């Protein structure tokens, strides 16, 4: 993988990991459409580690509060929300993996994301009050949304934020909870890949290209988080709903 390809992949990963358009789906489409070399497992680990670092830095204050035990109930909510994705990953790994080789399947999942985002937008439009706090039920519904987002094309951020909004949760709290929930999910996925591949996972890695890709993912990830919060705050989720709809339909037509 060249440095240019690594940077392009890093930018796509960083922006689409947090913007509600599905990072995994976009990586599948980018590599399929432009004929780029399929990224090695270790490069994928580097990109996800970079975006995880972006989340940790962006939400450092909240993570510090959780570590100090000042938001114990939130720790319970995060644990509840993590369970569905863990179960889905263990039970349906082969079926989920099959989606990564099919741009058309990804396109149909993008249409699902478009519908989910529009539902989140409707929740914002209909809301008369500021919203309520996260609860046991909403943490579970957000967790189920995260489980479905294991499929490439279904945006994790879009699904989890929309689930929180649909549950009547305050916009800022839905945004914060969705991304704090991503921390154990990404950590678990990274640990699983490293254990599965074994000690030789980094063999043959190109340090410069991998570092460049990770740096691009980290910087664009921070920008993506800031942009998504602005979109939610200004009630403009429909922008990404329209984008996913157009992209999904285009890919379905293009690959037929």
Image (cartoon, rainbow, N blue to C red):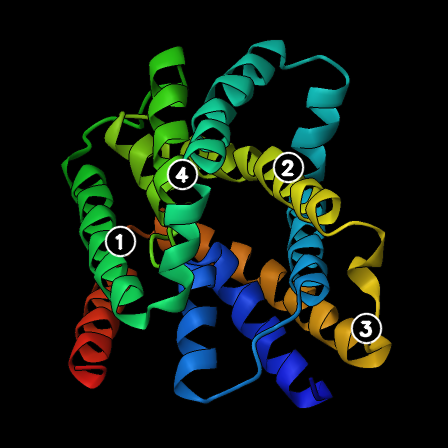
Whole-number angstrom distance, CA of label 3 to CA of label 1: 34 Å
- Residue at disc 4, secondary structure: loop
Q: Please tell me whether residue 199 is drawn above or below residue 62 in the rendered image.
A: below
Label 4 sits on residue: 92
Whole-number angstrom distance, CA of label 4 to CA of label 3: 30 Å
Q: Is residue 242 visible?
A: yes
Label 1 sits on residue: 113
- Residue at disc 2, secondary structure: helix
Label 3 sits on residue: 205
Viewer-proximal residue among 161 and 7: 7
Q: Residue at x 24, y 32 (%)?
A: 166
Q: Determine the image quadrant of residue 102.
A: bottom left
Residue 25 badge = none
Q: Residue at x 72, y 67 (%)?
A: 214
In percent of width and height, residue 56 lies at 70, 43
Disc nearer the start of the sequence (4/1): 4
Label 2 sits on residue: 188
Disc nearer the start of the sequence (1/2): 1
Whole-number angstrom distance, CA of label 1 to CA of label 2: 24 Å
- Residue at disc 1, secondary structure: helix
In percent of width and height, residue 88 lies at 42, 33
Judge from the rendering whether residue 35 lies leftward or rightward of residue 104; answer left or right: right
């Amino acid at each position: 993988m060249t440095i240019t390809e690594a940077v392009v992949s890093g930018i796509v990963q960083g922006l689409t990991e947090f913007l509600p358009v599905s990072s995994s789906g976009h990586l599948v489409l980018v590599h399929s459409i432009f004929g780029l070399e399929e990224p090695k497992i270790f490069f994928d680990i580097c990109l996800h580690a970079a975006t995880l670092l972006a989340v940790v830095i962006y939400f450092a204050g909240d993570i510090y509060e959780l570590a100090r035990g000042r938001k114990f109930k939130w720790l319970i909510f995060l644990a509840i929300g993590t369970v569905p994705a863990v179960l889905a990953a263990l039970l349906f790994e082969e079926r989920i993996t099959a989606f990564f080789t099919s741009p058309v399947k990804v396109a149909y999942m993008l249409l699902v994301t478009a519908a989910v985002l529009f539902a989140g937008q409707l929740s914002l439009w209909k809301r008369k009050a500021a919203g309520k706090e996260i609860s046991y039920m909403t943490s579970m519904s957000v967790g189920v949304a995260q489980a479905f987002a294991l499929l490439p094309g279904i945006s994790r951020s879009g699904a989890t934020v929309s689930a929180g909004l649909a549950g009547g949760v305050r916009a800022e709290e839905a945004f914060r909870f969705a991304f704090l929930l991503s921390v154990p999910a990404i950590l678990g996925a990274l640990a699983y890949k490293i254990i599965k591949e074994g000690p030789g996972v980094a063999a043959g890695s190109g340090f410069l290209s991998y570092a460049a890709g990770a740096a691009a993912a980290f910087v664009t990830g921070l920008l993506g988080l800031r942009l998504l919060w602005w979109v939610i705050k200004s009630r403009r989720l429909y922008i990404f709903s329209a984008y996913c709809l157009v992209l999904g339909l285009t890919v379905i037509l293009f690959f037929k």
